[in-house]
Image: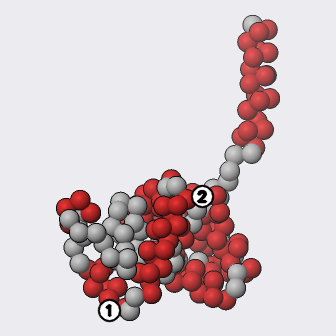
Amino acid sequence: MAKALLALALWLCLSLPALAAAPKKPPTWAELTSEQQQVLAPLATDWDKLEPERKTKWLGIAKRYPKMKPDEQARVQRRMQAWMKLTPQERRAARESYKKIEKLPQAKKEDLKQKWEEYNRLPEQERRKLGSAPRKSPASSGTPKSPTEPASSPAAPAVPLESPPAAIAPTPAASSGSQ
């Protein structure tokens, strides 16, 4: 009996600090500050449906937002709006693509970044044409891709944005931490 009480006391001593340090539930939209609501406005309609880890990531972005340069703030707003227009399946695909890109060797990341920048330098009409063209796998095409054609590898971004794929979605390290 004494051993059981001692074990219970020991368990309580060890588990209470862990329970006290348990992460609190992310706030609902109504609980956000007015500054957070202003920054995260594109997410307003879906905020309360987001998973807690996504809310935490977006809150991290909102916290860094005031320190950003105006052009960075505008880019964040555009990306947030584009992100919220995606379907859940498209978001999942973008996250998976991002994870694949993060696992690539640095040389491959640089190559992908260069191709992405080349793609973004194309006129809007040319980008639309490339984006709507059916994609062929490199093995089935038989011809090498031109340097201006974006990569169609599984690691290519699922969503055309304005910068390299590494900036598609908030990273776990950067904001832990939409998404």
Q: How is the image coloured?
A: secondary structure
Considering the numbered disc 2 on the image, is that residue within a helix, a strand or a loop?
helix
Reading the image, the residue beneath label 2 is: 172
- Residue in the picture at 64% in, 71% down: 61
Return the x and y of residue 150 as percentages of the image width and height. 37, 74
9 relative to 88 in the view: left or right: right
Type of residue at label 1?
Gln
Return the x and y of residue 80 as percentages of the image width and height. 52, 77
45 relative to 28 in the view: left or right: left
- Residue in the picture at 30% in, 72% down: 145
Reading the image, the residue beneath label 1 is: 125
The foreground one among 72 and 14 is 72
Q: Which mark is residue 30?
A: none
Q: In which quadrant of the rendered image does the N terminus lie?
A: top right
For label 1, the crowd category at 10 Å Cα-Cα, with few meaning under 14, some 14 to 19 and many 20 or more, is few
- Residue in the picture at 52% in, 67% down: 110
Q: Between marks 2 and 1, how big is the CA–CA gap?
A: 34 Å
Return the x and y of residue 97 as percentages of the image width and height. 42, 61
Type of residue at label 2?
Pro
* 49 to 3, vertically: above or below: below
